[in-house]
Image (cartoon, helix red, strand yellow):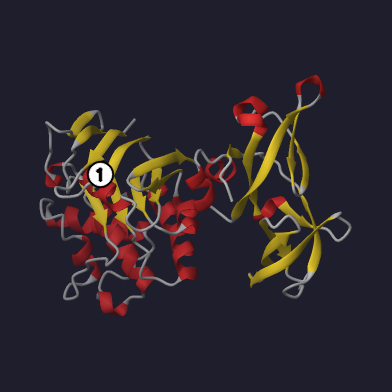
Amino acid sequence: MFLNVSQLSVHYAGRTHRAVDSASFTLAAGEIGVLIGPSGCGKTTLLRAVAGLEKASAGSIWLAGDVVSSPQVHLPAESRRIGMVFQDYALFPHLNVANNVGFGLHHLKPAERRSRVQEVLELVGLGDAENLHPHQLSGGQQQRVALARALAPRPRLLLLDEPFSNLDVDLRERLAHEVRGILKAANATALFVTHDQLEAFAIGDRIGVMHEGQLQQWDDAYALYHRPATRFVAEFIGHGVFAHAQIEHKEQGSVVVHTALGDLNDTQECPLPSAYPDGLCDVLLRADDIVHDDAAPVKAQILRKAFRGSEFLYTLKLQSGESVMAHVPSHHDHALGEWIGIRAQVDHVVTFPRVAG
């Protein structure tokens, strides 16, 4: 693997908890990895450790087969050939686009520098902007200039720290798709930090969810959503709730999951009842697992509704007192307090140990 982070810990003096605690993941050459998680979870510290801006307390970081960080080894940031893109872009306002992008290329001859600058500007779709200054560009264009500048010296690894946080929501997701295309065209290996799931899903080949310094799961977006490894990942990714359930053996070795929404018949993936005391567990129910069906025997009361354009996100209370969430087409515009029929349509039965309450 091109980037290999193994059991990495970063501990700041005077703090009781590690900022990063035994994190491990890998990135192949040309892959884009993303670290997401709530504020203070350690994702930026982990990125800074890969950059060489924080020292490893334990574990190691390998880059292209060489150890660059461990308790015994610390290759300085300037020697790692890593490019960085920050949330504030850090463009020089007095320099035009071409000179901003060529700032780190003074080791090249003037003709080579001009050629490389034009090459990366074409790559990011700004081939005609070389004589403009940053204040003449939109936020998205400034971000692409910052990306071009980071790519210009041909870094071994590109690190991006919340690069779209200053942009509006609609532009962020669109630009994430554009940046993914640029990085893939450049065959760049990149590690990206964000708190925005849509950005992460738009740009990442592999996504890591962090919580309290620990990397809870490193996987593709589909697996994070449908096969979360921990209860935190299940709660953090997407919309969903946990419902009490009981797993029971049926004939011919099959199992059924009893819930307040009815029985969930599975499946190859459902754990055996013996995985939990008396088969009692919590089952993850995503909003897209719950179908509005007026003919269904199970009724639920609408507690909250959020309009999303093509759909509502309903928060519903069952007669058992448990809550679920459901995506419902927006022409089904029901009033708060109304009771509607719902049924579960679960393709992936994901269970966790029972939590009281």
Residue at the far bottom in the pictured view = 136
Would residue 237 be found to the left or right of residue 79 on screen?
right
| Image: 171 above or below 196 | below
Where's residue 254, x and y in %? 76, 26
| Image: 53 above or below 223 | below
Where's residue 79, x and y in %? 13, 42
The number of callouts visible is 1
- State the residue in front, 249 or 234: 249
Residue at the far right in the pictured view = 295
| Image: 201 above or below 80 | below
Q: Residue at x 48, y 47 (%)?
A: 232
Residue 336 seen by the camera: yes
Snapshot quadrant of residue 352: top right
Q: Which residue is mark 1?
A: 18
Would residue 44 be found to the left or right of residue 232 on screen?
left
- Say few, some or many: other residues with alpha carbon within 10 Å of mark 1 (under 14 / 14 to 19 / 20 or more): some
Mark 1 lies on a secondary structure that is: loop
- State the residue in front, 80 or 298: 298
- State the residue in front, 175 or 350: 350
Q: Residue at x 27, y 66 (%)?
A: 89
Would residue 142 be found to the left or right of residue 103 on screen?
right
| Image: 112 above or below 95 | above
Where's residue 207, x and y in %? 44, 45
Residue 310 seen by the camera: no
Q: Residue at x 72, y 44 (%)?
A: 346
Q: Residue at x 11, y 31 (%)?
A: 72
In the rendered image, the quadrant that contains the N terminus is: top left
Q: Amino acid at mark 1?
A: Arg
Where's residue 160, x and y in %? 31, 54
